[in-house]
Amino acid sequence: MKRWRVGAAAALAIAAAPVWACGDGLGPGAQRIESAQWLLVVRATPAPIPVGKHFVLDIELCPRAGATLPAELRVDAQMPEHKHGMNYKPSLTSPRPGLYRAEGLMFHMPGRWELQFELRNPKAAPQRLVQSLQIG
Amino acid sequence: MKRALLAGLLVLLLGSARAEPLVSPLSNDDIPRILAFGPWPPPPVRDPSNRVSGQPAAVAWGAALFADTRLARGQTLACASCHQPRRGFSDGRPVAQGLERGMRNTGSLMNVGQQRWFGWDGANDNLWAQSLRPLLDPGEMGGSLASVAAAVREHADLRDGYGRVFGVAPGSDDERVAVDVAKALAAYQETLVSARTPFDEFRDALQRGDRTGIAAYPLPAQRGLALFIGRGRCYVCHGGPSFSNGEFHDIGVPFFVAKGKVDAGRFAGIAALKASRYNLLGNFNDDATRASAISTRHVVQEHRHFGEFKVPSLRSLAATDPYMHNGSQRTLREVLRHYSELDENRLHADGESILVPLRLTPGETDDLLAFLDSLNPAR
């Protein structure tokens, strides 16, 4: 398995955190990204994210009513105005369903970045959650 | 509140130490960006991948090895032959001249310990591997693992130096001895830190709110700085205390080195890095945690890296002409003309899209040169 893809299907028997408690364990400074189906809470370390230094994202993904955890979560980032992304491919680990740690990210330039979280399931179009950040 | 106060110092009181009031071209919004270019010097480097990093004995032996020709084939060249101290640890040539003519400009070693990637293509992720490379390159110093190790074993002063640094006599493992030689060379190069500059004095005065210190920074340099962090957007890549983000970009400098031959730059550098026995994921990394290998573990090769070269530091440029990865620009004025008249057709379609011709006026060029000159130690 590629290191940056984390399969969660095998562990779906363990329930993800309820939406009302989503991200409670991530500590202060966590940000929420919401859609009709998902609540994603993400906390960066160090914060604020510095230019040109690696940082870590701790992520909790919580499905809203009717949704289930995706089989795979991918994390990436882009600079829309610059039309390029990072020079590094983050690696993801998942200590339990719905909880992830992404390492190896780096914003190598100041400016507006978009953190992208792609939720993937077999035979379904990926869903994307995006957080816009001003760096530096 | 503090930033507003500092801005007030910039705009209203800049000329207070002069005969006539002067108005700074810098604004409130510029202050965080200016402060991000410091402080200087940075804290001393301690490389966890090099067990003798920061050790005085290693620094001293590394300095001696740096000037020693006995490590090279034919014993005619030393590291210092190309990395000449009086030239900012570069050589003044467009491209390097070792045992053979190279294809890239000899990079300065000033502040090399601050870097994440080494060489114009970043083919190494640590300074000792980068120091080993020219020793073994047939076109540079032309040695081998065996010849470097043999030189250390055979010459009493080198054997003693090795023992002082590593606590044992050089063993029979050629590769281990040669890598240790490179680690001593790295320990020395980590100490090559450029002196403080007029810009650093200005930047720190701004942070302190020191009106006299702020006013001492010449207006042409301030106008150049305003361009650098404003319309020119130079700071986007040339950011941080080293004035480099340490990464790689295509700025439209040709990468054809001869008929039918190209310098693939970062694209090939990543491939070489991943294949190297001496990268931070390998057995020669003295950092057992491998935490120092995080960049190597996560860097990826993409097509857009073709023809990208490392963003050089802008500190102490006065001694390191000519410029660019291929030494194609003789002066900083020529470098600025390159950016002013940038040929967008040379840029990658999937590369950095904020690069546009700056169309600098003669006065703006002079101001940027004044700013760049302020990044040299005071003469």
Image: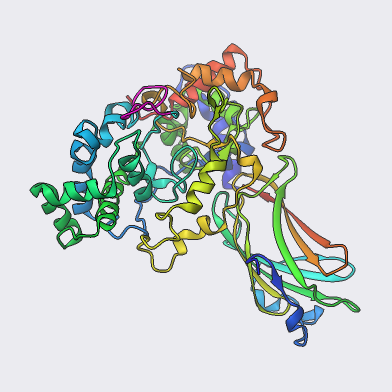
Q: Is residue B325 visible?
A: yes
In the depicted view, which residue is nearer to us: B7 or A53?
A53
Residue A70 placement, left or right of B256 = right
Residue B129, position in %: x, y? 37, 49
Vertical comparison of A108 with B18: above or below: below
Q: Is residue B305 magenta?
A: no
Quarter of the C terminus of chain B within the rendering: top left
Vertical comparison of B105 with B269: above or below: above
In the depicted view, which residue is nearer to us: B265 or B91?
B265
Magenta part of the protein: which range? B91-102
Q: Residue furthest top?
A: B362
Residue B229, position in %: x, y? 60, 33
Residue B165, position in %: x, y? 19, 56
Among the 4 quarters of the image, the one containing residue B40: top left
Q: Is residue B101 magenta?
A: yes
Q: Is residue B21 visible?
A: no
Residue A3 placement, left or right of B325 = right
In the depicted view, which residue is nearer to us: B138 or B224?
B138
Q: Residue furthest left?
A: B156
SS majority, magenta: loop
Residue B155, position in %: x, y? 11, 47
Q: Residue at x 14, y 57 (%)?
A: B164
Q: Residue furthest bottom?
A: A13
Vertical comparison of B74 with A13: above or below: above
Q: Residue at x 57, y 53 (%)?
A: B299
Q: Residue at x 41, y 27 (%)?
A: B317
In the depicted view, which residue is nearer to us: A115 or B50?
B50
Residue A66 placement, left or right of B33 = right
> So how many labels did they put on this image?
0
Model colouring:
rainbow
Vertical comparison of A118 with B98: above or below: below
Among the 4 quarters of the image, the one containing residue B319: top left
